[in-house]
Amino acid sequence: MTSKSAAAAARATVYGYPRQGRGRELKKAIEGYWKGRVDADALRATAAELRRTNWRQLAEAGIQEVPTGDFSYYDHVLDTSVMVGAIPGRHRAAVETDALDGYFAMARGTQDVAPLEMTKWFDTNYHYLVPELGPDTVFTADSAKQVAELREALALGLTARPVLVGPVTYLLLAKPAPGVAADFDPLTLLDRLLPVYAEVLSDLRAAGAEWVQLDEPALVQDRTPAELNAATRAYRDLGAPTDRPKLLVASYFDRLGDALPVLAKAPVEGLALDFTEAAAANLDALAAVGGLPGKRLIAGVVNGRNIWVNDLTKSLATLGTLLGLADRVDVAASCSLLHVPLDATTERDIEPQILRWLAFARQKTAEIVTLAKGLAQGTGAITGELAANRAALASRANSPITRDPAVRTRVGAVTDTDARRSQPYGERAAAQRAHLGLPLLPTTTIGSFPQTAELRVARADLRAGRIDTAGYEERIKAEIQEVISFQEKTGLDVLVHGEAERNDMVQYFAEQLTGYLATQHGWVQSYGTRYVRPPILAGDISRPEPMTVRWTTYAQSLTPRPVKGMLTGPVTMLAWSFVRDDQPLGDTARQVALALRDEVNDLETAGTSVIQVDEPALRETLPLRAADRPGYLAWATEAFRLTTAGVRPDTQIHTHMCYAEFGDIVQAIDDLDADVISLEAARSHMQVARELAAHGYPREAGPGVYDIHSPRVPSADEAAALLRKGLEAIPAERLWVNPDCGLKTRGWPETRASLDNLVAAAHAVRAELPTAD
């Protein structure tokens, strides 16, 4: 096929789409089901209607091949575990009794059975449920979901392509099941898994699938020869049968490197590759292997993870270069559009000029369709779209919103001394113990307490003008009083004010910093039914006035016990926002750090002795390739120290991280130079405590003993058992007792019971210590 005919064949497609619906209908239906207000049939009907709505929107926009199978009640990796029959033994009875309830039990746990571990999906803020596998795992095919959703799309008269997590990525994401040796490698199960995938592919072919997409994002990470060999074997075997659909192997989030020639040579009919700036090396690498003669290439030239309009001219140039490298070139986003909000046109509070700069999922599909049209018919067919795009790009580049000379001057004056505490940790620790007078195994929480319906109503009433600011603030005061009173009665040692006034740990600060934009409807799935509205970082950052001092000081006035000041750290402020793409991330991080430094100093001046600067995103933002990590960690840890280094030695700086693989960043955790770190550990059975000990981490740590992402209430004995396991790695004088994460998403009854048990566990274990009175 010539380049001209390849261009004429260009089609527009996507790999996945936001699941929640325009009004987060899926979240409401699922949570209604959990509470018994919605029955299973109604939940399924809502889900089916959302799928139909998504497919119709895509088709009407000009997407010629819609994805199926990307929709999920909770998580697509959990769906894959169901598809291959990898149900943990502790959940099998529940799944066999009721498949839907058993599915949610795996995701959330029950009072008697722990859920699957949850961690971040590569370097995004999406969380997946980690498969648990062992040498005795038996895989069995269950393609019911995938086949049913394909048939739904075909019944609408659409061309549809099922999307599955690929077998190599699935095994590389898995962990040894509880009770299985820690050195067990799930990849050794590949030969056992491949026949199950082949059966699913055969079922999809029988149901009408011409193409099936197998996602292998794990191959953009550094992979050993054995892992690359596994990929070779996987697609050699899956490509062999004749009764299968055409196979499209997709990767995204970074460059493929050594895996690219493996996939290029595989007996599959197509590849889908990321060609955004993060993976620009894929273009040269594809040319180096001779392209994909006789194969289909889907080119991900529209960034599926950020919200800025695409540079259509630049993308068309990339697509033109690719035309000679494949039999057919189609156009897509770089990854699933799951990672961006649904529709920018619903935003009413963003200036029209700025709105022109933004592209959410629906706008990105329009960009994809425009690019496919331009590729197939030439730029003359999209003259108007190109002119509007150039105008939007120029408007942003020339806007005074993006640059503040005072901020840039301050960043330029930063020195190495600004990012170092005045005394080493040992001297600080002694000063803090004398100042705070805490017992061994001090107890605390991570920061937030339940956001009740009453609080959400109060915020809505304030926005709608049904109550005034004074009335709203009285409600916040009452909530803080209740939270402080509860913590005192429970016996916690270091208290928090509960964050009643905060809508989200990033958005709350973004709304008070210059340079940020907040959305009203920009919801993005974080995990399950948890959706967040990432703010948009559009310009230079500064802090006009204190953001947290008033409420922290008020809480401290209610109790003689220390109350932590609570801030979100600079890396997390970037990671959980849509960041600007017109300057290096490290430069933006320093701007945010200096704004937060002012807040830390003001908290200390107001009498706050313990200040927590959360960095849960430090690990998730870690580059996928090892070669890129030192540079990132250098500016990321510097930004944290720049935020916190200006305080006195006796002011205790805490940080917090959750739901990530910490082993890769233990040195970076050390480099933060925080006095205390709290981390998720309950679902991962204190793994992080062992990792800290192996590193020789010298500071205080609180590996969580209460999994707050499950509704179950851990008993005092269970929390004590985890605490004792923590003591095997961290000495008592450096061990804290706390939940895994904030309590915002939990209800008050389970929160009260769980924290009562947490404090009881701390007292019980404290009494066992040789140094206890």
Image (cartoon, rainbow, N blue to C red):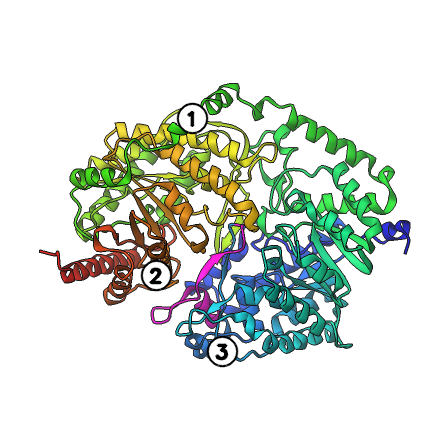
Give the residue displayed 20% in from the left and 48% down from the top: 493
Sequence order check: which comes first, mark 2 or mark 1?
1
Q: Which residue is mark 2?
A: 686
Residue 559's quadrant in the figure?
top left
Q: Nearer the viewer, residue 639 or 138?
A: 639
Looking at the image, the residue that sits furthest to the left is: 773
Q: Badge 1 local density, few (<14 within 10 Å), some, or many (20+)?
A: few
Q: Position of residue 692 (x, y in %)?
A: 35, 54
Residue under numbered circle 1: 415
Q: Determine which of the numbered discs, if any, sits on residue 214 in the image.
A: none
Q: Please state the extent of the stretch shown in magenta in the rendering.
A: 101-124
Residue type, mark 2 in image = Met
Comparing 584 with 485, the one in front is 584
Dot 1 amino acid type = Thr
In the rendered image of this protein, does residue 587 appear above or below residue 19? above
Coordinates of residue 474 in the picture (x, y in percent): 29, 35
In the image, is 114 to the left or to the right of 277?
Answer: left
Tell me the quadrant of the picture where the C terminus can be found. bottom left
Question: Is label 1 in a helix, a strand or a loop?
Answer: loop
Q: Secondary structure at mark 3?
A: loop
Q: Nearer the viewer, residue 359 or 455?
A: 359
Counting from the top left corner in percent of width and height, residue 703 is at 32, 55
Relative depth, front residue between 149 and 664: 664
Return the residue at label 3.
Answer: 135
